[in-house]
Amino acid sequence: MRLQLPLPRSHPAKPLVGQTVPDRSARADVAGDDALWVRRDEAIMGTAIHVELWCADAALARHATDAVIAEMHRIDRLMSPFKPTSELSCVNRDAATRAVPVSAELFALIERSLHFSRLSDGAFDITFAAVGSLYDYRAGVAPDAATLERARRAIGWRHLVLDPAQHSVRFAREGMRIDLGGFAKGYAVDTSIAILKRLGIAHAVVAAGGDSHVLGDRRGRPWSIAVRDPRDAQRIVAVLPLRDTSISTSGDYERFFERDGVRHHHLIDPKTGVSPSAVHSVTILANDGLTSEGISKCVFVMDLPRGMRLVESLPGVDAVVVDAAGALHVSTGLAAASGAPGGVTRQ
């Protein structure tokens, strides 16, 4: 069964997002209008970057898409755990022995991560990287039990020591590492959309893997966003007509390997150091990408009832969740808009 959702009341002019797919059939039927849509795709931040915007000025359109791509590269240089010169890598290298001064931008993002950690009782924790760095999903490598346990002891967001006066970060536990992969792409989408707005672009979508934002509409129609089946990339489980919204999908099918019937994927429970298995995908709609991506990670790691209670407690936030049994769960705001029950089994 495919859930067809009308534009939700809680998002009168909102979103799009990763591992969701824009429905090309929803383009406006205006003569010559399609020629004014400019599209660009790049591979940055270890993911697929997609920019699509409408602009009557060809030079401005090129400048706008170039600006978005440049912004994605900037965020990557700042936050990549794989680039040795990034600020994040400097923190991981030195913060166990001294307080490391960082830019105001990176400091604010680390502070924001602690907000999600408190909100989710630690389900969101950027220090999960102590364990996450031990997995190699391409090679199918997982840590043994003893190595996992040693690394797990280094996890703990409460042991991040932040000095607002100095904009510095220090680790209070040996072996700690941080990774902003839980919301860095959502942040990059946010800053890219802000750039497009400053340039006067009113209709656009920016996507970074599972995280997207739709700006305005498709020239008279909402953006039609499809949420893919987490077990079949050729099927979709929901279609979301959206305007001016951020949408993020976290799924156990993005980076994973299976061993002895167990799926090891990149979403890790900081308390156990292993991948949760209760849900297959979580899609969150919110006003900004930091929130939608951060909450998608929280809900994925939390058990489903607690995760949905968290969503219901947050104004302007909605969710579509596919659980391990293949059942579709939607937040009350979306359910009320669609007339669907809280859990819908796919067929």
Image (spheres, rainbow, N blue to C red):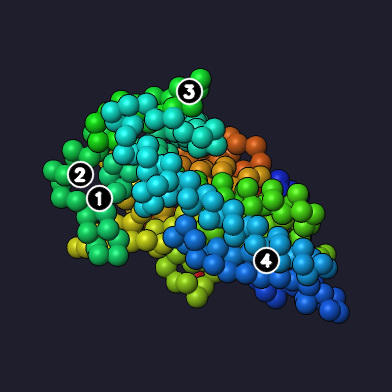
Three-letter amino acid code of the residue under disc 1: Leu
- Whichever of callouts 2 and 1 sits on the residue coming sooner in the sequence is 1
Three-letter amino acid code of the residue under disc 4: Glu
Label 2 with label 1: CB-CB less than 8 Å: yes
Given this view, does label 2 or label 3 mark the residue nearer the observer? 3
The image quadrant of residue 201 is bottom right
Label 4 with label 3: CB-CB less than 8 Å: no
User: In this view of the protein, which residue sits in the foreground, 79 or 286?
Assistant: 79
Residue depicted at 37% across the width and 26% down the height: 99
Q: Is residue 34 visible?
A: yes
Q: Position of residue 236 (x, y in %)?
A: 54, 69
Residue 336 vertical position relative to residue 3 in the rendered view, above or below? above
For disc 3, the neighbor class at 10 Å (few under 14, some 14 to 19, many from 20) is: some
Work out how far the residue at label 1 is from the one at label 4, CA to CA, in angstroms: 36 Å
Q: Is residue 282 left or right of residue 148?
A: right
Three-letter amino acid code of the residue under disc 2: Leu
Which quarter of the rendering shows the N terminus? bottom right
Q: Position of residue 220 (x, y in %)?
A: 83, 65
Disc 2 target residue: 148
Residue depicted at 25% across the width and 50% down the height: 134
Disc 1 target residue: 134
Work out how far the residue at label 2 is from the one at label 4, CA to CA, in angstroms: 42 Å
Label 2 with label 3: CB-CB less than 8 Å: no
- Whichever of callouts 3 and 1 sits on the residue coming sooner in the sequence is 1
Residue 96 vertical position relative to residue 231 in the rendered view, above or below? above
